[in-house]
Image (cartoon, rainbow, N blue to C red):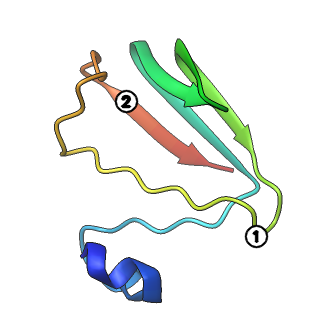
Amino acid sequence: ILLKVPRGEHVSHPKVKYYQSKKIIIEADSKSAYHLDGELFFDNHFEIDILPGKLNFIYNPSAKHYFLNTKKIKIGAE
């Protein structure tokens, strides 16, 4: 799938969820690590307001993440 991403051909794959949104909200049952402008933070609630055409976001929930210490994570878009 990864090789299809630069051409945008990955969005039709059955394991890909594709959203277009002005805002992304991530909630987890415990604090998780995230990086913002080179700084490391921990929280269980994260909101992103998106400027049009300025952010591409890829997340693989089935991958092993060394920083993910939560059993439940919810990602949604408004």
Front-most of 50 and 37?
A: 37
Query: Mark 1 highlights which residue?
Result: 53
Label 1 neighbourhood size at 10 Å, few (<14), some (14-19), many (20+)?
few
Q: Which amino acid does label 1 sit on?
A: Gly
Q: Is 62 above or below relative to 25?
A: below
Q: Quadrant of residue 37?
A: top right
Count of marks placed on residues: 2
Q: Is 43 above or below relative to 73?
A: above
Residue 29: x %, y % from top left: 39, 14
Residue 14: x %, y % from top left: 25, 75
Query: Mark 2 highlights which residue?
Result: 73
State the CA–CA distance, disc 1 to disc 2: 26 Å
The N terminus - image quarter: bottom left
* Residue displayed at 19% across by 44% down: 63
* Residue displayed at 29% across by 23% down: 68
Q: In which quarter of the image is residue 54?
A: bottom right
Task: Find the residue positioned furthest to the front.
Answer: 38
Residue 48: x %, y % from top left: 70, 39
Query: Is residue 46 at all visible to an observer of this figure?
Result: yes
- The label nearer to you, 1 versus 2, is 1
Q: Is 20 above or below relative to 13?
A: above
Q: What residue type is labelled 2?
A: Ile
Q: Is 1 above or below relative to 43?
A: below
Q: Is mark 2 on a helix, strand or loop?
A: strand
* Residue displayed at 27% across by 15% down: 69
Q: In the shown orientation, is residue 50 left or right of residue 58?
A: right
Label 2 neighbourhood size at 10 Å, few (<14), some (14-19), many (20+)?
some
Q: In the shown orientation, is residue 30 left or right of residue 65?
A: right
